[in-house]
Amino acid sequence: MELYENKTAEERAMLISVDDGTFDPFVSMEELTELATTAGAGVVGSIIQRREHPEAATFLGTGKLAELIWFCKDRSADLIIADGELTPTQGRTLEKLTDCRVIDRTMLILDIFAAHARTGEGKLQVELAQLRYQLPRLAGQGTALSRLGGGIGTRGPGETKLETDRRHIRRRIQKLEEQLAELEKRRDLQRKRRRKTGVVTVAIVGYTNAGKSTLMNALTDAGVLTENKLFATLDPTSRALTLPDGREVMLVDTVGLIRRLPHKLVEAFKSTLEAAAEADLILNVCDASDDHANEQLEVTKSLLNELGCGDTPTITVMNKCDKVGNIYALPTFGSTVLISALDRRGLDTLLDAVVKHLPATRREATLLVPFKNGADAAKLRKEATVLEEEYRDTGLFLRVIADAALLDEMEMWTVLE
């Protein structure tokens, strides 16, 4: 049992966890504390119990449950947050025994997402994830679903949608899925246009609060919100970036990752994270000053594999190096660059590394296409970026930037200027 100093936050939270040996409970509890603080709660204590699996009815075993009940009264706690996913039975039983509201890690993260979503699509994704999470937990509750008391875990659609019956919630889920599917079609069209015009994408990914948005602002003056909080950025931001070799790429800032991010949330926000899956190059940003930097890199690497982009070229960006005493002791994964985005140190080295790692898929070429081969000329106009075009006596002169594969196909028309 660990107690914390008195908090003046609106809600006073007790944190509970069951250590089943599958994760580091102390690191996870530190993170849960940060999540709770980000959501606006004051953490007044925590309990970690070592056992093979959570108690089916109460999550904690009898002894630790008695401690929890006593400390909730002693510390005037009004909220319990479980570092794991609670069953409906566990949640209801804990609420009855402690007279506190009870939420779990998934609901806490969804609450933070609801508070930070800015775009229409982000809000739709949050609502869909919340409703999918709540639907199986409505069994046996009939119409007694009122949780309008407010507080962490009730933000977003939870305040109103849970007043309706299951049938209405299912209809709402279907509607949200249709809206998001329509947005997915639009993104597919945008991706096809980017491929046609040869736009190269570089995605900034990494652990939440690692400084991704600060790096985005330092490289592009994007003006992205930066806060020392988890999930300060939820909606992706894209900005053009000109590299030292003159190429222009699209730099995309994505939602932060986290340890033990529930799989259902990865699925729900796949469209937000798909910028990484579609990227030509990934910048894996890590807080170099964090004691668990190595684990953070592993978490990001694992989730990137889950998204199907484990083979995408990646640069490990160790950020916040201004806070590190011995930079030579930092963990490295493949190509590593040391920077301080806040102080703008190391950015030139990072940009040079981006140039080096980007695949050379497009290049400039000069061609003279005979008039009788009009189909080839039409294909070049359609699929390449035409920089110069002129009709000459022997054919159509073109100076283009195109994919290497297309230029190889048109190699017989290549001329030297």
Image (tube, rainbow, N blue to C red):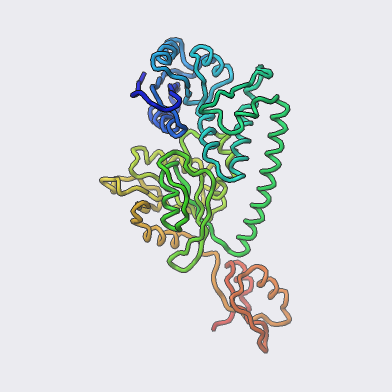
In the current view of this chain or complex, which residue is farthest to the bottom?
A: 393
Q: Residue at x 66, y 80 (%)?
A: 369
> The N terminus lies in which quarter of the figure?
top left
**Between 192 and 312, which is closer to the camera in this rendering?**
192
In the image: residue 49, left or right of residue 386: left
Name the one closer to the observer, 7 or 226. 7
**Quadrant housing the C terminus:** bottom right
170 above or below 120? Answer: above
Residue with the most extreme left position: 325
Q: Is residue 285 above or below residue 406?
A: above
Q: Residue at x 54, y 70 (%)?
A: 363
Q: Is residue 311 left or right of residue 407?
A: left
Question: Foreground residue, 353 or 146?
Answer: 146
The picture places residue 143, in percent across and down from the top left corner, at 68, 19
| Any part of residue 247 in sight | yes
Count of numbered circles on the image = 0
Q: Is residue 392 above or below residue 98?
A: below
Tell me which residue sits at (65%, 18%) in the image. Answer: 144
State the image coordinates of residue 120 (x, y, percent, origin top left). 61, 44
Can see residue 338?
A: no
Q: Position of residue 170 (x, y in %)?
A: 71, 30
